[in-house]
């Protein structure tokens, strides 16, 4: 199946839901993402067979090492798109259109080396040649948001929605983990003018999961856990190191994950 994962790089990734995907054992996944450790983990576990991405970065680390290793070994198909192209593809899918005309990516290898992406000539007097970015429909979208009510309306309180709304609209089904479930009347309490609302028609299941973004940054709730992200990167050095990291921080339920994170930081302080 094709799973779209919200967030951006190492920012507000639905890491608890990604760990649930890992524990499910499902394989041969196409992952669509502005990628970060979500993509890296699913590459490290061998569950991602194709990655459709604008990038795969950890922000403070330029490239996720697990994705890079699998790509260099030819073990994952990489469909690399200009960021604007991926937005156009998700937007087309959200509107149930076959493609969206865009200038993004025009003349670049993202178009020239991808036989699945065509160009189209404007039917108007300008005659401009545009990229006909095909829709990127998703079977499932996974996002981590700030608040939701019991009906499925959810809110991003921070300054950037990271296109999570497009992922939700492009998907047949959307699962949102959230920091808290509140009454409908409290959804926008204290929200600034940049808050983004995803209405209940866009979300199929809400999972209460405080801290569900894991070590990725989640303003205004938590900064990126650079120490744990560093341990994640360091674990790419060997299969044994990855197995150790995976046993502690990936193949575990949420209570165990939080306990292991607390233990990790307590040991780092001693």
Image: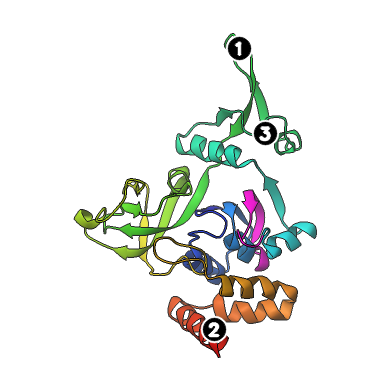
Give the left or right position of residue 12, taking residue 106 as reference: left
Task: Name which residue lies at 32% across and 59% down.
Answer: 147
Give how far apart the Cα atoms at labels 1 and 3 are: 22 Å
Q: Quadrant of residue 116?
A: top right
The secondary structure type at the circle numbered 1 is loop
Q: Which residue is mark 3?
A: 117
User: Camera-side residue: 119 or 64?
Assistant: 64
Task: Looking at this view, name the residue that lies furthest to the right.
Answer: 73
**Residue 56 inside the magenta-drawn segment:** yes
Task: Looking at this view, name the residue that lies furthest to the top.
Answer: 125
Q: Which residue is mark 2?
A: 264
**Screen quadrant of the C terminus:** bottom right
Magenta segment range? 43-61
Q: Residues within 10 Å of mark 2 (few under 14, many from 20)?
A: some
The secondary structure type at the circle numbered 3 is loop
Give how far apart the Cα atoms at labels 3 and 2 are: 46 Å
Report the disc number at residue 114.
none
User: Camera-side residue: 6 or 267?
Assistant: 267
Any part of residue 74 in sight: no
**Looking at the image, do the residues carrying marks 1 and 2 touch, with CB atoms under 8 Å apart?**
no
Return the x and y of residue 247 as percentages of the image width and height: 59, 81
Q: Which residue is mark 1?
A: 126
């Amino acid at each position: 199946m094709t799973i779209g994962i919200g967030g951006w790089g190492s920012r507000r990734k639905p890491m608890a839901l990604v760990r649930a995907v890992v524990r499910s054992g499902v394989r041969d996944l196409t992952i669509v993402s502005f990628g970060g450790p979500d993509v890296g983990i699913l590459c490290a576990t061998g569950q991602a067979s194709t990655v459709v991405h604008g990038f795969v970065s950890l922000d403070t680390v330029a490239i996720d090492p697990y994705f890079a290793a699998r790509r260099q070994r030819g073990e994952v198909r990489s469909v690399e798109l200009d960021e604007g192209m991926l937005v156009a593809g998700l937007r087309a899918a959200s509107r149930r259109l076959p493609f969206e005309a865009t200038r993004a990516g025009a003349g670049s290898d993202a178009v020239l080396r991808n036989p699945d992406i065509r160009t189209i000539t404007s039917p108007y007097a300008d005659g401009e040649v545009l990229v006909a970015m095909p829709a990127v429909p998703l079977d499932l979208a996974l996002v981590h948001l700030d608040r939701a009510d019991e009906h499925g309306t959810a809110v991003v309180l921070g300054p950037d929605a990271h296109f999570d709304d497009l992922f939700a609209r492009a998907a047949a089904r959307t699962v949102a983990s959230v920091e808290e479930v509140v009454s409908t009347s409290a959804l926008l309490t204290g929200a600034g003018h940049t808050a983004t609302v995803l209405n209940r028609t866009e979300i199929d299941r809400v999972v209460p999961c405080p801290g569900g973004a894991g070590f990725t940054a989640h303003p205004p709730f938590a900064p990126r856990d650079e120490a744990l992200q560093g341990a994640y990167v360091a674990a790419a050095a060997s299969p044994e190191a990855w197995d150790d990291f995976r046993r502690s921080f990936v193949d575990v339920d949420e209570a165990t994950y939080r306990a292991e994170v607390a233990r990790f930081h307590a040991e780092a302080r001693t």
